[in-house]
Amino acid sequence: WSQQPQKRISLPLVLVTLISAFGSSVQYGYNAFVIFYPAKYIQNFYNETYRFRNVISIDHSLLKFQWGLTVAFFPFGGFCGTLLAGPLVDSIGRKATLLVNNLLAIIAAALVIATKPRHAHELLICSRFFVGVCAGIAFSVVPLYLAEIAPQNLRGALCTVADLSITFGSLLAEVIGFCEMLLAPSLHRTQDPHPSPPQTPRLPH
């Protein structure tokens, strides 16, 4: 039996792996947990928006319902994104799917930015759906893409980076949220469930 020469890891391979993982998998873990620490402040914003429109404060049961939608739309979007991943990969390829996936992140970011100026909390809820779709596609496609570009002897290690990046994204959201709680309540607006920072590094690849 002749053994094939073992390919070594190269700098371009490392860079592409890190860019793919940070720009896709990290944002999955980040957006899954970023919503929880500023929950109180987001609910206050919902109440302010309702009062701006109707003069009276929002009913407690309606507030809980809207908050439930805000949380639930992310996994629902993830479910839809996972279903879309297969047809997209088959039609345009893995790399192109990840690049197109950035459009969903841009849409989600635009909705978050427009939420407060327009006094429309519905935009925030919709943004959670779009970022969920984005995360679902990334969760499905990134391991496929890394397996495609990795040498056979490094395939297992590189595909594990995607799963590790999800955990890192969750940790990042927890650390940011905890630090903001310690610093000042007013800083919670910087941790709005905004997908742009984790998404941006994926653009070059």
Image: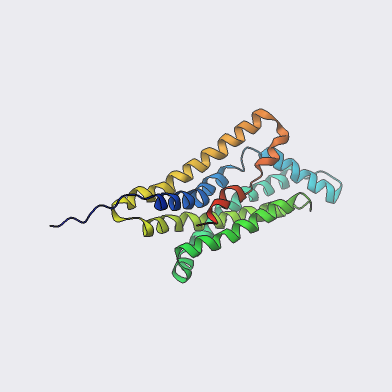
Left or right, residue 165 beside residue 105: left
User: Residue lying farthest front?
Assistant: 11
Residue 38 visible from this viewpoint: yes
User: Residue lying farthest right?
Assistant: 55
Residue 46 drawn above or below residue 106: above
Left or right, residue 144 beside residue 198: left
Left or right, residue 83 beside residue 6: right
Q: Position of residue 170 (x, y in %)?
A: 52, 41
Q: Position of residue 153 (x, y in %)?
A: 28, 52
How has the structure been colored for display? rainbow
Residue at image position (47%, 42%) is 167
**Of the pair 188 and 121, the residue shown nearer to us:** 188
Q: Quadrant of residue 129?
A: bottom right
Residue at image position (48%, 51%) is 19
Residue at image position (45%, 55%) is 142
- Which image quadrant: the N terminus? bottom left
Q: Position of residue 31 (x, y in %)?
A: 57, 47
User: Residue lying farthest left?
Assistant: 1
Residue at image position (79%, 48%) is 49
Q: Position of residue 125 (x, y in %)?
A: 67, 52
Label total for image = 0
Residue 59 visible from this viewpoint: no
User: Residue lying farthest bottom?
Assistant: 91
**Of the pair 42 and 16, the residue shown nearer to us:** 16
**Of the pair 56 and 178, the residue shown nearer to us:** 178
